[in-house]
Amino acid sequence: MFPEYDVIVVGAGHAGCEAAAAAATMGSRVLLCTMNMQTIAQMSCNPAMGGVAKGQIVREIDALGGLSGIITDKSMIQFRMLNRSKGPAMWSPRAQSDRMLFAWEWRLALERIPNLDIWQEMVSGLVIKDGRIAGVRTGLGIEIPGKAVVLTNGTFLNGIIHIGQKQFGGGRTGEKAATGITEQLIELGFESGRMKTGTPPRVDGRSLDYSKMEEQAGDDNPEKFSFDPQTKPLTQQRSCFITYTNTAVHETLKEGFDRSPMFTGRIKGLGPRYCPSVEDKINRFADKERHQIFVEPEGWDTVEIYVNGFSTSLPEDVQYKALTKIPGFENVRMYRPGYAIEYDFFPPTQLQLTLETKLVQNLFFAGQINGTTGYEEAACQGLMAGINAHQNVHGKEAVILKRSEAYIGVLIDDLVNKGTEEPYRMFTSRAEYRILLRQDNADIRLTGIGHQLGLASDDRLHRMQQKVKGAQELVEKLKEIRVAPDIANPVLEANDSAAIRERSGLYQLLKRPTVTLEHFAAAVPEIKSTVAAYEQEMVEQALIEVKYRDYIDKEEQMAKKMIALENLSLNPNFNYDSIPTLSIEAREKLKRMKPQTLGQASRISGVNPSDISILMIYLGR
């Protein structure tokens, strides 16, 4: 009934969609297995993509040739660039999405890939022969042969949903849990654990009083996520709104604490520290009189509202009563209550940096099965797992992004080398080279890699090269412009910057923290005419280059030093017990993790700088 597939992807969430699309686009014959074809790419939580650090990841996925950026552009209803008041390393794009349109655009995109098939059924087990993957087994007992398998099961592995004292099996509300895979993996020697996440109630927007809330509009000049010119920025947007909880809301929520699955101990899994439930917030931060609530529309035409900031697993009657005490929610009508969900995950230290498992050849894990949380974190893992599954099957070199190349590289390196005991979420603070890993230069960093893999088109590569060329040209032209003191000083003094005594180069003046090109453009006509000849993204790239070049140089030097460590290979099967001067903890961790390079060893929790020095001496360095 089924041919032998090159790659079988289990699960059609954000990770699964990216994995299937990448492997198929690169030339593999791919089967995407999903329990429900109507929920492909479902936005189970908030209807948004991007945000701090997450926006950088979406740009990186897009630069490599993944589809999340394009799909987001086609389905967004609002765009905001967060942290504009900070340096460009912190600028983070975020889009509010039309939830139904997002899923629909993903399904259309998948159906347009010729060698990608879809099968609707639960996968209940894996077919393994001689320590390597040979296919999957479905709930109907069908064996589907495959050379590589990517598991992207999300919250479905033995998922349990909690609402107050009620609990029932499910991977999402209204959908059954997936069983069989966890038990088989444990038999094979894998270690598993339990994690928890949650979601807030959904409400009818027609029942809200927006006059009591703060409007949060999109940017005046909205951008987009994808570097591909096929998508266009929004010409109209939908607003979100902000309101707040209060002491009355908190007291009402506390009435249900004795029936809370979190406080009564029924939930055993670890929840996300950085996205706590509302009951957890008022318990942990008892001194806070209020917490922000973001009122987010679910799409262009629907009246359904996502109550961001009110994630909860309290009884539904308590949820409703507390909602009515939030300003603007006095007459709220609830579509469905919030809930918590517990699910199985597998500590990612059991993976290689390709996301292939160490125990079973050509078996890959991506997304929440690895202990992460968030659409963007899942999507980028799916992309890399799909790429490397294809590479493995066709005998090609593995693709591993360095920490200095991409947030994706940081995320995977963190997971594999450090593991995670709580749902892992990406932050800019996790990246030591964040000045290099900006959202604006993701195409410059990664399009070449995507093009070599056959994911990014020739046109994409050409546009990136033109952007670099244009930015470099503009920088050289800015170096040629010189400004006299009588013109420069009024501008400098108005922006709290020291005056100059002689004619100075514009390039040097723009390095000053408080001074921008716009400040000088009105006073020096030559600037306006020079800049007008270039596209906006070239201008932005050039100005970042001018103002932050010194900082960029320092990070590049740091990255080169670390890359030198990465190039020092270690034998994964080396006997670390033969070096008695290593700490006992280091020996235990190194034996378990089997790092392939000295750089990887340096990032393992429990391996100290002194241990690395000892290894370097052993290597003759």
Image (cartoon, rainbow, N blue to C red):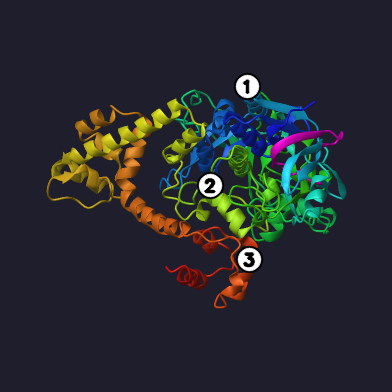
Residue at label 2?
400
Magenta highlight on residue 284: no
Residue type for callout 3: Lys
Q: Looking at numbered disc 1 in the image, what kind of residue is underneath it?
A: Arg
The residue stretch that appears in magenta: 138-159
Residue visible at 64% across and 23% down? 108
Distance between the Cα atoms at labels 2 and 3?
22 Å
Q: Identify the residue at horizontal 19%, vertical 46% (top origin).
A: 489
Q: Position of residue 465 (x, y in %)?
A: 37, 32
Which of labels 2 and 1 is toward the front? 2
Image x and y of residue 293, in percent: 64, 44
Q: Secondary structure at mark 1?
A: loop
Other-residue count near label 2 (Cα within 10 Å), few / some / many at <14 / 14–19 / ≥20: some
Nearest to the observer: residue 496 or residue 3? 3
Q: Where is the N terminus found, in terms of image quarters?
A: top right
Classify 611 as above or below 343: below
**In the rendered image, which residue does mark 1 sit on?**
112
What x and y, as percent, mark residue 107?
67, 26
Earlier sequence position, callout 2 versus callout 1? 1
Give the CA distance from mark 2 to mark 1: 28 Å
Q: Is residue 148 magenta?
A: yes
**Visible in this render: residue 238?**
no
Viewer-proximal residue among 586 and 427: 586
Task: Please indicate whether residue 319 sits to the left or right of residue 456 in the image.
Answer: right
Say whether residue 204 is left or right of residue 441. right
Q: Residue at x 49, y 46 (%)?
A: 406
Ranked by sequence position, the earlier of labels 2 and 3 is 2
Disc 3 target residue: 591
